[in-house]
Image: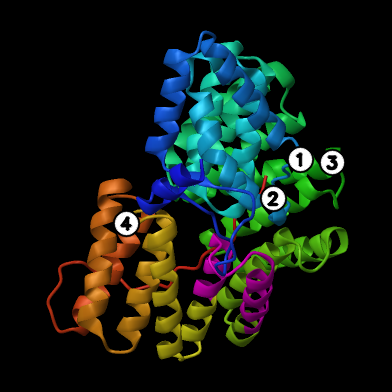
Amino acid sequence: MEAALNGLHTYGLVDTPTRQGGQPVLGQVVLHPLVREITAHTHTTESTEPNRYQQVLTGRLIQATQGVMSARIADWDTARLLAPHLLSAATHTTNQHNRHLADAVERISQSLTKAGDYGSALQLQQAAHSITARSFGPDHPEALNSHHHLADALDLFGRHQEAADLHQQILTTRERVLGADHPETLLSRNNLANALDHLGRHQEAADHHRHILTARERVLGPDQIPTLHSRNNLGLALGYLGHHQEAADLHQRALSGYERVLGPVHPDTLNSRNNLALALDDLGRHREAADLHRQVLSAYEQVLGPDHPSTLHSRDNLGLALDHLGRHREAADLHRQVLGAYERILGPDHPSTLTSRSNLGLALDHLGHHQEAAGHHQHVLSTRERVLGPAHPHTLRSRNDLAAALRGSGRASSVMGHGRRRWFRGPRRS
């Protein structure tokens, strides 16, 4: 056995996982997919009870997920380890109607969402949804919940139109089955509004969020977590619409509630503080905004680590605040760091990656590096035209940013507009 393992290790077919910093994880090995699939195939074809092996393995995987909590950072490594094995089990023919497995896969998907691994989370949620859709009717609460989580995963991965379409379907069904003020109906309306905001339909999003906030204040009270989330989300939509003072007031109220209920360093509290900083900057209070962003970044780095998407959002927002204060070189350095991390973690076409590249282009333009800035803006514009379409607000903004850089470099442009900084407004909450 030892000789066989050494041989596999020599050819890179088995490895020992390591934690951040290079420390090995004791008692665990990672098999190359080729070895895993050949082993599974051997058991399936040669065993006298081909399904029993898969059933036992699936049962052990489900058992391993029982203690995993999505909000507990210490469980994220476990979720990452279990994810590929659960995905393989979920696609096996013996598990087409295994509801317990669907629950386990969804649990790990939610954990990876919290960890910022949106691509893996979406894959798992799609697998869980396939099982659930086969097991229940379309109006069953379990099917609706699975649809809801799939729409959320699509939205986080940048597939906003698909997410909005799914959320609209779920909202229509829940309004018919549960009523307009049921908590799950309000949740669907909230997440539809979030997707609409991502699509640039800010007025529709604000109208939904105002409706939800009023209903949650009446049904749940002013200091319940869902009510605080609604206050946060309405503030974000109003910020995009240019109602900066109203947005700042809402974010200040939300932050006070989060600090009182969750404490000063909970991720939701940090997100709220980030959003208050954005509103202050919109009001011209740049120094206060920069100080708040620096506090949030330091806390995120300690709580979530340097490469979590929330940390990267915060670092990019600090760069924007520094750019407002005329510290363009520091801003460009921060944006370049964030862009490299996003390209590695989320891919080149993810909305967060494109926003970071756009912000780097703006900082370079302010430094007088107009040609380099134009290259970044052209890249963003081409991608947004392909992904979002030519009339999306983000596409139009990219066209304006490119026009400004071309004018700075002395090159003629038929596109009129004015470059504008793009903040990473904090995540919308449910």
* Residue at image coords 38%, 53%: 10
Q: Position of residue 69 (x, y in %)?
A: 73, 44
Tag 3 secondary structure: helix
Tag 1 secondary structure: loop
Give the Cα separation between the discs numbered 2 and 4.
Answer: 38 Å
**Residue that label 3 marks:** 218
* Residue at image coords 80%, 69%: 264
Give the Cα separation between the discs numbered 3 and 4.
Answer: 39 Å
Answer with mark 3 or mark 1, whichever residue precedes in sequence.
Answer: 1
Assess whether residue 412 is covered by the magenta stretch: no
Answer with mark 2 or mark 1, whichever residue precedes in sequence.
Answer: 1
Q: Nearer the viewer, residue 352 or 345?
A: 345
For the residues labelled 3 and 1, say whether their Cβ atoms are less than 8 Å apart.
no
Give the Cα separation between the discs numbered 2 and 1.
Answer: 9 Å
Give the Cα separation between the discs numbered 3 and 2.
Answer: 36 Å
Which one is in front in this view, the residue at disc 3 or the one at disc 1?
Answer: 1
**Residue that label 2 marks:** 75
Answer with mark 1 or mark 4, whichever residue precedes in sequence.
Answer: 1
Assess whether residue 295 is covered by the magenta stretch: yes
Residue 195 visible somewhere in the drawing: yes
Span colored in magenta: 291-317
Tag 2 secondary structure: helix
Residue type (three-letter) at the residue carrying disc 1: Gly
Q: Position of residue 55 (x, y in %)?
A: 61, 18
**Left or right of residue 254, residue 315 in this image:** left
Residue type (three-letter) at the residue carrying disc 2: Asp
Tell me where residue 125 sits by quadrant: top right
Give the Cα separation between the discs numbered 3 and 1.
Answer: 35 Å
